[in-house]
Image (cartoon, rainbow, N blue to C red):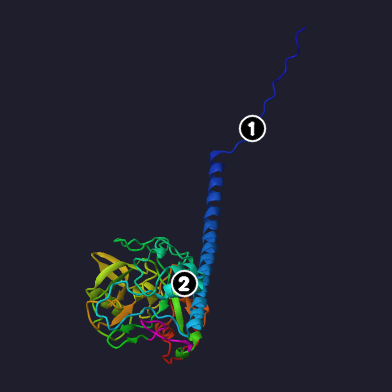
Amino acid sequence: MLPAKTTPFTRHVRAFTLIELLVVIAIIAILIALLLPAVQQAREAARRAQCKNHLKQLGLAIHNYADANSKFPPSATIDLSVTSTGNNGSWSVHGRILPYLEQASLYNRVDLSIAWDFQTPISGLKIPVYACPSDPKSDLARDPGGGKVILYPTNYAFNFGTWFVFNPSTGQGGNGMFFPNASLSFRDVTDGTSNTLMAAEVKAWQSYTRNAGPGSTTIPADPGTAATIVSTSGAEYKNTGHTEWADGRVHHQGFTTVIGPNGYVPYDNSGTIVDADYNSWQEGKSGSAGSPSYAIVTSRSYHTGIVNVLMADGASRTISENINLQVWRNLSTRGGGEVIGDF
């Protein structure tokens, strides 16, 4: 007898079709696209908070310096009796406040009475509190060659006032919180420390022109006039602004309020339009006896729509780039007598 014929068991396997797979991939892509901006915003918020904390530390250092020395640090010390000086003769505020930023060991290894550009302890050393984490160029060190020290940039500049910086013929300084040979203290801030800027953000590796004279000593009335001064001055062009934290000159360690925060000043550099600053004459530089310094060095940041600032009372604040220009200028004067109100 033959065995009964059996029917083999057939197993059906369910699989994704190509269309279903594409739909799943599209959904995942949409979710990622929605998630990434949120992640980036969270990261930027953290960087912005860290940036404000850096400014707060600078404020504490300045206050501690003032307590110890009964005055704020000068932006530079210049011997007005000497008619021939080197380019890098004097240390910046950044260098003078090192022991109050837990950098006493470094401070003890340098000599602030001589030029900084060959003092090897600062070469290749990045001081984290001087860098904004949002600036992509803050990690780009500058090597000027010739055996000079390699320096990292700074993203925090000190308030040199509205426009005029220094006149070596008279020893007169500007209306801000810092200028060469200054001996200012809290009593000189008659506008009130909560109404006066101490420091603000700047961008590393900033383009600027220098050493051509201001043409006019009158502060530019608006950004357009400022752009004309920069473009027609015939000054020497550089793209290394704010790259030397130890340098005492305004285009490396300072800012002025000719232009509002994140203001744009176009300059044609051999056919390439760049956003530029301006220093009519490097403070203390030889070659033009008695030349005063006027500066358009704008506060800028990589934070969208704002810059972080430090007030003279030690508070760090966020300022909109849309702040009224006159209010911005009033905030930079230590004793202008302006009524500022809310900002």
Q: Can you tell which quarter of the image residue 93 is in?
A: bottom left
Q: Nearer the viewer, mark 2 or mark 1?
A: 2
Report helix, strand or loop for mark 1: loop
Distance of label 2 from label 1 (alpha carbons): 72 Å
Residue appearing at x 45%, y 77% in the figure: 199
Is there any visible trace of residue 221 in the rendered image?
Answer: no
Quarter of the image for residue 123 reads bottom left
Give the labeled residue for mark 2.
98
Q: Is residue 73 depicted above or below 111 in this figure? A: below
Q: Residue under circle 1?
A: 13
**In what element is the residue under mark 2?**
helix
Q: Which picture quadrant has residue 332?
A: bottom left
Say which mark, if any, is on residue 257.
none
State the residue lying farthest toward the top.
1
- Which amino acid, by three-letter code, is at mark 2? Leu
Towards the viewer: 96 or 236:
96
Q: Position of residue 233 (x, y in %)?
A: 23, 76
Q: Is residue 276 magenta?
A: no
Relative horizontal placement of residue 32, taking residue 299 as reference (left or right)? right
The answer to whether residue 8 is visible is yes
Stretch in magenta: 175-186
On screen, residue 119 above or below 62: above
Left or right of 30 in this view: 274: left
Give coordinates of residue 286: x percent, y percent. Answer: 25, 77
The N terminus lies in which quarter of the figure? top right
> 78 or 300, which lies in front?
78
Q: Earlier in the sequence, mark 2 or mark 1?
A: 1
Q: Residues within 10 Å of mark 2 (few under 14, many from 20)?
A: many
> Is residue 183 inside the magenta stretch?
yes
- Dot 1 amino acid type: Val
- Our reading of the magenta stretch's main secondary structure is loop
Q: Position of residue 147 (x, y in %)?
A: 31, 61
